Image: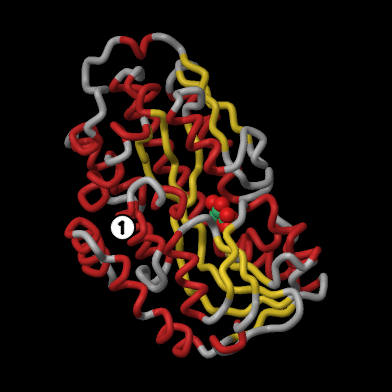
Amino acid sequence: MKRTAATTIGSLLAVGLLAACSGSPAGPGTESGAQPVSWRLALNQTNDHPITLAVEAMADRLAEATDGRVKLEIYPNETLGTQPETLQLLSDNTLELAVISGPQLENLNTDFAVFNSPFVFDDIDHQMKVINDLSIVGDLYASLEASNNATVLGGFTAGERSLYQADRPVTIPADTAGLKIRVQESATHMRMIELMGGSPTPMGFGEVYTALQSGVLDGAENNEVSYVTQKHYEVAPHFSYTRHLIVPDYVVASTTALSKLSAEDRELLMAELAAAIDEQVASWQQATADAIETATAAGATFNEVDADAFRTVLEPLLDETLTTDSARSLYEATRAAAK
Ligand code: GCU
């Protein structure tokens, strides 16, 4: 059987491992979940992004499955704030759910950096097998509960990421020399661009378009879907297939809010999340093909690079990232899960 998020999280729930792994106070028999709740889920994607569509559908199914006890209101487009801001809202328990990119969590627990590192995952199937297997990630996902009131519930894929530039394509690392390339606010990603030869420029997602347009940035890196939903192809039409990263987009809950759900509602939430993850992953290939078509029709070009050359310059990053026993174990479990 193909191992999907639904089967992995579902089977762990069946044997009661989720509550044990998360260390959250909500356990079987919690009574307070009888109260209907209306939760807000914040994300930074546009309305038509596959993750937004998946969480919208999840909200409908969850309301039905819980007879209206758990309602989710979805806030896309950074309307509730940037990812670092929504993470803070979760910590303050003034928001219940947010989709947060891997690099943001690395700033709270450096072990998350393992999954933000180049070439750790062979492909999206491999990534999904790891980031939704609580026997691998259970401790990591519960690690922010005491410090940040944040419980990671699972992860979507944020796809394979590549470089793109305003003025010219790149084919070898030396081509990035002198280019100011936007990265997410993460030490791993800054170092990654440095090793490639470029000048890393950390910046929030929503600011990238204007910065590319005005020349504050020479390039950025992302997947084809975000390249198009954010319209970056209009201002950086040279997409260069470095395929250097496959980063997770985690679904993170306020630990306090989660603890107030009954065991039954929590189980229903996790089952619908697993289904949403499977849906998003299943739609990703088509969304990518559509994005390439849209960008190409508007004049953007997609070029291949010397992939081995990029892989070679990025090699030192892994040793720099695997600095703790727990990070090394995560990496080993990840590689063991590869085909
Ligand atoms: C992708 C990813 C987002 C992330 C963004 C970024 O779109 O899905 O979660 O915030 O890249 O580069 O900031």
> What colouring does the structure picture have?
secondary structure
Residue at horizontal 49 percent and vertical 86 percent from the top: 307
What amino acid is labelled 1 in the image? Answer: Val
Residue at horizontal 32 percent and vertical 72 percent from the top: 318
Circle 1 sits in a helix, a strand or a loop, which is it?
helix
- Quarter of the image with the N terminus is bottom left
Residue 202 x, y percent position in the rendering: 57, 59
Q: Mark 1: is the Cβ under 8 angstroms from ligand 1?
A: no
Question: In the image, 38: left or right of 49?
Answer: left
Looking at the rendering, which quadrant does residue 13 occupy?
top left
**Could you say which is closer to the camera, residue 31 or residue 322?**
322
**Could you say which is closer to the camera, residue 3 or residue 246?**
246
Residue 123 x, y percent position in the rendering: 41, 69
Residue at horizontal 28 percent and vertical 73 percent from the top: 319
Question: In the image, 110: left or right of 12?
Answer: right
Question: In the image, 201: left or right of 148?
Answer: right
Residue 205 x, y percent position in the rendering: 63, 53
- Quarter of the image with the C terminus is bottom left
Residue under label 1, please give it.
130
- Picture mark count: 1
- Image: 260 above or below 254: above
Residue at horizontal 30 percent and vertical 43 percent from the top: 141
Residue 263 x, y percent position in the rendering: 28, 22
- Image: 212 above or below 179: above
- Image: 66 above or below 175: above
Looking at the rendering, which quadrant does residue 240 occupy?
bottom right
- Image: 188 above or below 272: below
**Could you say which is closer to the camera, residue 2 or residue 78?**
78
Dot 1 surroundings within 10 Å: few (below 14), some, or many (20 or more)? many
Ligand 1 falls in quadrant: bottom right
Question: In the image, 242: left or right of 216?
Answer: left
